[in-house]
Image (tube, rainbow, N blue to C red):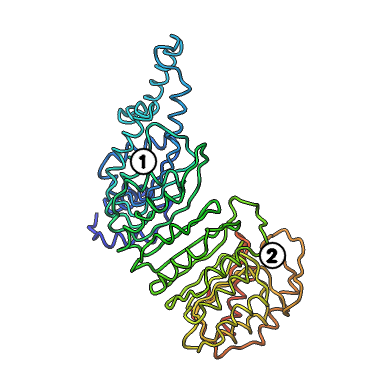
Amino acid sequence: MIDIPHDIWLHIAQFIPLLVLRNMFSLNRTFFDIVMDLRYQQVSFAYLNTRMIRTLVRLKDPAVAKRVRVLHIHPYFVKQVLEKETTLPTWRSKSIRRKFEDIACRFRDLKLFGKTDEFRLIRSFQTSDGVVEVMLDVLSGLQNITDYHIMWYGLPTIHQSPTPFLVTAFQPNLRKLSMEVSLENLEKLVSVTGVLDNLEELDIFFRVDGSDSPVDHTAIMTNYLAPFINHLHPTLQYFAIQSWEPLDFSPLFRALQFFPVLKRFSIAIPNSSPHLGDPSGLRDLLTRQSETLRHLTLRCTQFSGAGLIADENPVHEWMQKVLCDVTIAGLQTLEVGLGLFPIETAIMCLQRFAKTLLSLVLTGRYLTYEQISTAVSTFAHCHADAGLKTLRLGPLTLSPQLVDLLAEKLPGLGRLELLIREVVPQEGDLPVYYIAPNPDHNQDEDQIELYFTEMEKRFYPYWMLRHIALSRSSFPYSLQYQLQHMQLFAECVPTIQCLT
């Protein structure tokens, strides 16, 4: 066989579909390493089953463990073992028949797995202490983890906490930590984690576990969580926070110190009062980071509380108090998820930050022509060489007048992404639909042809648009006449270089 350099094999592998590549591990050492990296790059542990046992056995091999980069853990398997401990009778109290059944099950497991290591792990997972011991052993060997995702909530109080093996995976290579945990569990988790010297991204989704005794959430935030986050101040570049329930997080926001390299901040606001508590808390945080923030993501959630329909504009009033006197001098990207976020609040944010924005995303709710006009008009003061460069909108109704509006108000725009629900030949026309066997083509074709006829009259020589992406807002269906849309824009805008 010809001795081909390793780099060339790597280049060849880039053109092979993953499903085919996974079966080529025996071709040579290069392909073996590629396939093994793909197979074990990301692992997850949630439910105690055959697959989890086999994965744990493989990860005891250092040659396999070194390949893991992304780890997901939801310690539900601890609950499974605890339930088994409390429901199954002890060996002495079992009948002779039950003892023989247990012996038969063990022989069945041995026959099923066929390996001594797997059989030993099965026996270790008979008790919660054994679970903790095995997980400690395996996770301590994962030295190259860069992304770690923890889900720990809704599990009963247990005498042997999963905290030891959860924090074992905190390694020097860790760059991203995502936690969906209850505040009660978070207290146990962050109090023993120490310092993560190289962490760059922190994403926390807070929950509150039910408890018979009152829990001082403020004390957990200020005494445990804030010090943990503050330890990350030299390296933290991205911070995301959301809460399952409306809760006062202002003590946490006030307790956080200045993060010199924090560039991206994402926050999800509960739609029900008190939202995230005293708005001055979040205002203080944004003011403190006003010189470093470049990317801000805003959205609303409604996982619990007074229901999906809250009081009239409660978030708008709360955000008004948050943003009063807030100036983020270097903000370049604003992303607003409009699913529950009021459009008037998004416009208010635009009016405050438009002077420096280079990128804007407004998605998650149908946008009318008037709403889009109000949004893009906030950039009217910007020179074509400055101002907005990237815009993502939708879902919306595409009309020639809407394209005229975008070209007029945003002449310096370089990239445009539109999520299109339908097209009409004139703004204000109602889209006409008919029932078609193919769901990809359900708008009246005559109306679409009129749209193309009107658009063919357009030409935008001064629009600096380089890249346009058009897609249908209803996944997974594609945009009707998508290829024709691309060809149309290529003729209308002479500067376009890329269409997707």
Number of numbered tags placed on the structure image: 2
Q: Residue at x 37, y 61 (%)?
A: 14
Q: Residue furthest top?
A: 96
**Label 2 crowd bin: few (<14), some (14–19), many (20+), radius 10 Å:** some
| Residue 478 at x, y percent in the picture | 61, 64
Q: Quadrant of residue 378?
A: bottom right
| Residue 219 at x, y percent in the picture | 42, 49
Q: Is residue 196 visible?
A: yes
Q: Which residue is mark 1?
A: 163
Q: Residue at x 60, y 67 (%)?
A: 317
For mark 1, give the secondary structure: helix
Give the side of residue 445 with respect to residue 482, left or right.
Answer: right
> Foreground: 161 or 396?
161
Badge number at residue 441: 2
Give the side of residue 130 with respect to residue 314, left or right.
Answer: left
For mark 2, give the secondary structure: loop
Q: Residue at x 61, y 80 (%)?
A: 488
- Report the Cα–Cα distance between label 2 and label 1: 53 Å
